[in-house]
Image (tube, grey):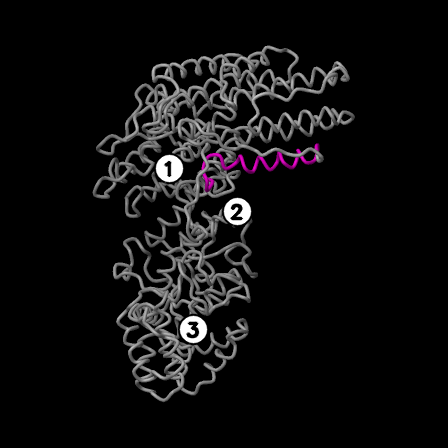
Amino acid sequence: MKNASTVLALVGLAVLLPPVIADACGPEFEPEPRFQVSDNPDRPFDRFAAGRLGVIRRTYDPAYLAYAWRTMMGIPTTADEQKHLVAGWNEAESRYGYGADAEWASQQWIVARKEVAPSLEPRELIFMGEQNYARYSRIHGDAFLHAASTARTLAREWKQRPALLNEWVGNQDRVFSEGCAPAEPEPGFVETLTPREQARRKAERDYQSAAMLLYCGQFDAAAQAFQDIAGAADSPYRVLAAYLVARTRLREALFKLSVEDGAPPNVDAATAEALFPRAEEAIQKVLADPKLREVHGPARRLLSIVREHLSPETWRCELFSRVLEKGTGSALQAELGGLRMAWDPEGNTVTCPGLKPRAAELLEWLQLMSIPPNGDDGAPMGPGPAKAFETSVARWKKTAHPPWLVLALLSARADAPEVPALLADAAKVPVDAPAGMTLAWRSVQLLRERGQLAEARARLDAIPLTLVRDQASTDNLLREERLHLAKSWDEALRNAAQLVVDEGALPHQDWNAQTPETVAMGLSPQRARYLESHVPTRRMREWVALPGVSPALRRQLSWAVFARAAVVGDDATLKAQAATLAETEPKARAELLAIVGRPTLEERLFDARLLLMGLPVVSARLQPGRDRLADVSPQLDMTEDLSWYRNGWCVPGTENLQDPPGTPGPLPVASPEEQADAASEWKALNAAGSSVAFFSRVALDWAKAHPDDPRSPIALFRAVRSSKRGCGQNTPEAKKAFSWLHKRYGKTEWARRTPYVY
């Protein structure tokens, strides 16, 4: 196990020296889409930073919960603070973690460099360095952006001096590669410049020299170089250089620590530890100078790293006060990111005695709002929902602070006697207030659970659609309520699909849209299972026809309805959906129309099932996530079975056949007959099993009943082939189909093409 200093070194390196994460080898799958966020708000984060919090989740990381607290309590956040918050959150939540912005920022530098010095051959950018066996990002994104901005400024200022500009660009290339000193100019070059040009050249060259020393690990020389710049009254970098003295000292301290077990430190441990107080002294010098206010925010970010190393528990508690301060610039993002809850072995939160009242209130709210860690048996530890509810109700009555009302509703049981009064209080909060959306959504949910459906619908209808068109996660929660409060099948089905929250900032349509949705849609596992078990096939067909379904989801659902009808034996839906698909799927048109033209139900069902056997891309189950059939390309090969992908369909485990606790019951719009049909079809779908087992039984039964039908060996062949990459290989059903194929049709092409069972 790493010792404490090693762990803290890694914490520091994550902030100052962000690593690049390497992907493992293997198939490159798209990440599974999300329909609800759990740890962080929806992207883009600009809305959350600006106070549009949407529905606040108790699973958010402490940084987002604390920011929500600030916002609900009316603590203002400046535009500068919001800018840094958004940048930091984007970095923290990016796929590759810290350092992901450097690649993007470097592209901005490359573009600017090409603009100002198109004839100058570029040098390779060296993003990564290595220290004590650890790789790190040696160049931060802000350095590339600063260089790009400076390049354009100098291009205007030195428009008549291309040689001077090229010298600067060449030296900047050395900064971003492995140069440790600027290139020497040609003899007599400096003398050709005007005094003003010489002064600006010297300022730029001094700054580039200091940066090279920093990146080359010559920390004492770099610190002195930055200090000299800070003391030069005529340097445009004097303020930034004062901050970079502190940054240099902190990087030096972090570099001296061993970051891997067995990796030798550059100096002895005592000397390495002594470097952190020296770094803090340099930081405090910056913070004490009012003339350096513009870099106070970044300096406070450095202080967070030092204090986390030197006194982690003291700093953990101090942060609860610091994150409530106003106007701290980029420091707010860093200090929010440093917030963490501490738990003792029994799962109780570790408190911070001596906090000022407002900070103590924030800590208590976070303790009750945050989901505690699990015990060894998987059961939640720490204060349970009963304590969270009891405490939050008491605090709300005493303080009238909105965060307590939010927590009270989020932790309330629908049958609690305090709920009516809480709902009345929540109704007084405007829905566009920071806490408003959370209170409105949870009020609808509680009213529905209490059986007050009319009141729930009225509260839901009062939420303006304009407030959620750019917040997919919140919209999905409201669509869930509309689904279960719908007065008609049309309304219910319009809310059946969910919006993907990972598809960027594109606005989506409202639930009543009359045109196809332009953003990605899909189904979570929970939603897919609920719809499968509560919506009859004929109603699913109505769902596919609704205008607001996205094209990709429509294609997926269209085939799922056809396949489901074929499996459960819904003849009317089968014929209607086959005719519809024939208009949109030209490659399968002939087979689909042939199904419609078959004279008997038996033949229609067999032909439909035979077609499905040849289309591994189709599933009779509602597939959650990003399915391979959610593809609108007319060139999609529906006959191809693929390794590592779904082919046909699987069947859920027996534990998934019953509704999980807390699942809403049947849809109110479903008649008793429709509820019975849905239950019967759900039972038949599960009894059919996986596609491999189902196809094998169908093919074998048909071949035994119709031994001379030329389709019999084809069906057996397709059933056996489906087991190659289908759900469940070497199944008893596939073995029986294989045996019958070779026993009765051994001399056919289909038997020769099937030498073994998979």
Which one is nearer the viewer's eye here, 170 or 322?
170
Using residue 336 as the reference point, say whether residue 514 is left or right of it: right
Residue type pointed to by label 2: Gly
| Quadrant the N terminus occupies | top left
Label 1 sits on residue: 405
Which one is nearer the viewer's eye here, 374 or 702?
702
Label 2 sits on residue: 504
Q: Is residue 671 above or below residue 400?
A: below
Residue type pointed to by label 3: Gly
Q: Earlier in the sequence, mark 1 or mark 3?
A: 1
Which one is nearer the viewer's eye here, 370 or 308?
308
Label 3 sits on residue: 614
How many residues crowd around disc 2 within 10 Å: few (fewer than 14), some, or many (20 or more)? few
Where in the figure is residue 66, as x and y percent of width and height?
A: 41, 32
Q: Earlier in the sequence, mark 2 or mark 1?
A: 1
Where in the figure is residue 380, as x and y percent of width and height?
A: 25, 41
| Residue shown at 40% from the left, 14% from the top | 277
Residue type pointed to by label 1: Leu
Using residue 386 as the reference point, say whether residue 300 is left or right of it: right
Using residue 742 as the reference point, say whether residue 304 is left or right of it: right
Q: Between label 1 and label 3, give the one nearer the viewer.
A: 3
Q: CA distance from mark 1 to mark 3?
A: 56 Å
| Residue shown at 32% from the left, 41% from the top | 411
Where in the figure is residue 314, as x and y percent of width and height?
A: 34, 20
Q: CA distance from mark 2 to mark 3?
A: 36 Å
| Quadrant the C terminus occupies | bottom left
Q: Secondary structure at mark 1?
A: helix
Q: Is residue 474 above or below residue 496?
A: above
